[in-house]
Image (cartoon, helix red, strand yellow):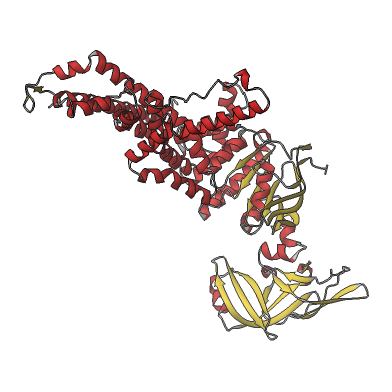
Amino acid sequence: MSYGQKVDIIDIDYNWSLINYARATDGVYFVTLFKSVIISLITTFLCLLIAIPVAFYISFSSVRIKSILLVSILLPLWTNLLIRTYSLIALLRTKGHINNALENLWESANYLLSFFRLANHNFIGESFTPLSLMHNNFSVIFGLIYIYVPFMIIPIYLVLEKIDRNILEASYDLGANHKITFFKIIMPNISVGITSGIILVFIPCLGSFIIPELLGGADSQMIGNIIERQFKSANDWPFGSALSFILIYITIIILGVRYVYSKLYSRLYQRGVS
Amino acid sequence: MTEKKTTIELKKLTKKFGDIIAVNDVSLKISENDFFTILGPSGCGKSTILRLIAGLEVQDSGAVIINNKDSSFVQANERPVNMVFQSYALFPHLSVRDNIEFGLKLKKISNTDIKIRVEEILELVKMNGYDFKLPSELSGGQRQRVALARAIVNKPKIVLLDEPLSALDANLRMEMQQELVNIQRNLKMTFMLVTHDQDEALSISSKIAIMENGKIIETNTATNMYEYPSKKFSAEFLGRINIIEGASSLIDNRMLFNSDTFGKINLERDIKLPKDGVLGIRPEKIIIETGLNKQKNRVSMNGTITNWTYYGDVSYITIELKNKSKVYINVQNVHRNSLQELNIGKKLFASFDINDLIILEK
């Protein structure tokens, strides 16, 4: 279908043209695509930064705390994505929970300052201005991280569990400090988990449309929103499918790079070049 | 002989895990070039001692002194000791060579020196040619060699071995035991081994400490520990022994032991039996006789065979005396046609030399 052309409301002419793909490289679409990749990359990177310490903490906890923490990470996944996203709106909006809490904080601080007769000095601003946390890039990335961080934590936690604790002790015993042990011993052994986590987070991020739709503003649209619009309001199915295919190609390229990389890595090893 | 230098000294070392006292007031001295073995049943705290020396655990009280330097609170990565773990703990993502080099690279040794030393060690543990194999591609025995090489390549003051041979099959274990001794002697290093295997302890160590419930019961050289143990627990744990209960009395400065099993035994020795002490005789010291041996220095008995276990080279038999007490005897299988004389229910005479009796404290 992506090689066809829309002729009227319901008819599509399958004429094997590449015009839809050419259109996709047009300014606005290309920028959105590029931006989607950047947002996904940032989200993946931040997820990684959050997930590694969390996975470590879970992995090194006692058995009871471990199961409680794992359930609390997995439990939100049983809730519908929409509900979770709406709950974020309640948190982030101008009169949302975060701003309310900040406002309360401001008021108590103001009260405290006036108690000490310092309120006139405007240390904390004349009045409370709510942070604009919604409908911008921040809210989209925040939402994406909130939704997808479990998919990063779980694979990292699983490979971490498989590491023999004795090899960490062996590393200290042989004279390595904690930093060297982390980078030379732990990281290579959890790299499998990290790559699968990156793939599990990056690919759905790239295709997500509910989160930017609900949390994003006019300038934080992602490629998923545009695709959705082509199939619905714009009623341009050929162009929508062309954009979808571009997403699929990007995904395949990423998976291909990963495959080649892992092949290359193991071959280097066998030759002893490592 | 000059006094040997002390490599490791433990002073009143104590370590608790919750309510359990894993190591209880342990004091030990390990001299240079010793092959020191801690022998004890599983869960007696012997591995914890190694971990305390390595710095992987911190003691609750007491001190670890390495090379005359109090190292009680020195971090594990700064102690001049290296450990061979029970599970080998090789780095799975690194090749054999990288595993062995790991410790050296952290010590800022020049690359050429590292290369020379790794080659030497690979030669020593007979693993040359396996440089670039991953641990997952090696057999159990080979992993064992790499784990050992990784520890000794750093030339530590002491190599700590935590039941390193327990995962190997019997033949390979014997071979590795011999190699361990050879390597230790060739390199003139101090080894400290922890094991629950009595044969292993006897065959490879120069000194043995027997441990029970977090306490060191007794320390002695390997042969003395078997032939002249002083505690009942160590005599029973290291090898088999017949315990002879009874009461002793001194007559004309000679000890007379009134035993429950063999009646009166004149020890002919000027020693006082410790309070609630017992005598012991090793099963292989009792020999089968054709008749009642009436020599002055021998204790004789006759009884019926109630149990016979065949081990190929030896048979373990149990005889029951008239007074219902049981005596264990090891019979060397010298002639294959003499096996028929050891049937259950047969009567036989046996005797042992009173000089072979061991005086034990409970």
Q: Split into 4 quadrants, where in the image is the C terminus of chain B?
A: bottom right
Residue positioned 27% across, 27% down in the render? A224
Instruction: Depth check: give the residue in front, B91 or B345.
Output: B91
Does residue B277 appear to the left or right of B350 in the view shown?
Answer: right
Does residue A116 appear to the left or right of B344 in the view shown?
Answer: right
Q: Quadrant of residue A200?
A: top left
Q: Quadrant of residue B64?
A: top right
In the orientation shown, which residue stands out farthest toward the bottom?
Answer: B322
Q: Position of residue B284 (x, y in %)?
A: 67, 68
Q: Position of residue A77 (x, y in %)?
A: 37, 43
Q: Position of residue A238 (x, y in %)?
A: 14, 25
Residue B8 in view in this figure: yes
Does residue A77 appear to the left or right of B254 in the view shown?
Answer: left
- The answer to whether residue B85 is above or below residue B199 is above
Residue positioned 72% across, 82% down in the render? B292
- The answer to whether residue A151 is above or below residue A110 is below
In the orientation shown, which residue stands out farthest toward the right?
Answer: B252
Q: Position of residue A227 (x, y in %)?
A: 22, 26
Does residue B184 appear to the left or right of A242 in the view shown?
Answer: right
Residue positioned 31% across, 21% down in the render? A218
Q: Split into 4 quadrants, where in the image is the N terminus of chain B?
A: top right
Residue positioned 33% across, 20% down in the render? A219
Instruction: Depth check: give the residue in front, B319 or B209.
Output: B209
Residue B94 in view in this figure: no
